[in-house]
Amino acid sequence: MSGDKGSVTVEIFGQEYKVRGDTDPDRVAEIAQYVDGKMKDVAKGAPVGSLAKIGILAALNIADELFRERAEKRKMQEDIESAANRMRRKLEEIVP
């Protein structure tokens, strides 16, 4: 990874990309390494051919992770709200 003010150069699957923005360069590098790893996993798993296909399959895998995390977060929020409501009802029974 290299960079100048406002931009970072990262390598993903053997290709260099210049990323511009306000995001911390270390964070950009971490994300790029993650994407690179996902693409390498896809390429190892099956010979799918083009860089575009590997990128799309890696993106699908990452999107699947994101959707699972969102569902887990939503479930946790529902569980917390349910527990809070139960506690509120019990307190209302005890304290008029």
Image (spheres, rainbow, N blue to C red):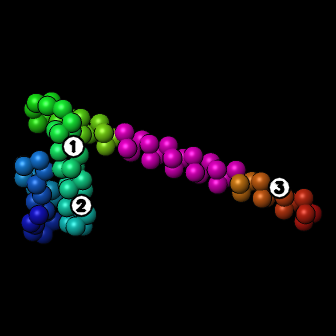
Residue 34's x, y, as percent? 24, 53
- Provide residue 36's location: percent of width, then percent of height: 18, 50
Along the line of sight, the residue nearer the viewer: 49 or 25: 49
- SS class of the residue under badge 3? helix
- Which residue is label 2 attached to? 30
Which residue type does callout 2 highlight?
Glu
Q: Give me the C-alpha separation between circle 1 and circle 3.
A: 50 Å
Q: Position of residue 89 (x, y in %)?
A: 82, 55
Residue 48's x, y, as percent?
15, 30
**Residue positioned 10% across, 66% down in the render:** 3
Which residue is the extreme one toward the bottom? 5
Q: Residue furthest front?
A: 45
Q: Is residue 58 above or below residue 20?
A: above
**Is mark 1 in CB contact (under 8 Å) with mark 2?**
no
Name the mark nearer the viewer: 2 or 3. Answer: 2
Q: Quadrant of residue 88?
A: bottom right
**Residue on which the image places disc 1:** 41
Q: What residue would you read off at disc 3?
A: 89
N-terminal label among 1 and 3: 1
Mark 1 or mark 2, earlier in chain: 2
- Left or right side of 2 for 31: right
Instruction: Tell me which corner region of the image, top left, top right, bottom left or bottom right, holds residue 65.
Output: top left
User: Over which residues does the magenta segment extend?
Assistant: 64-82
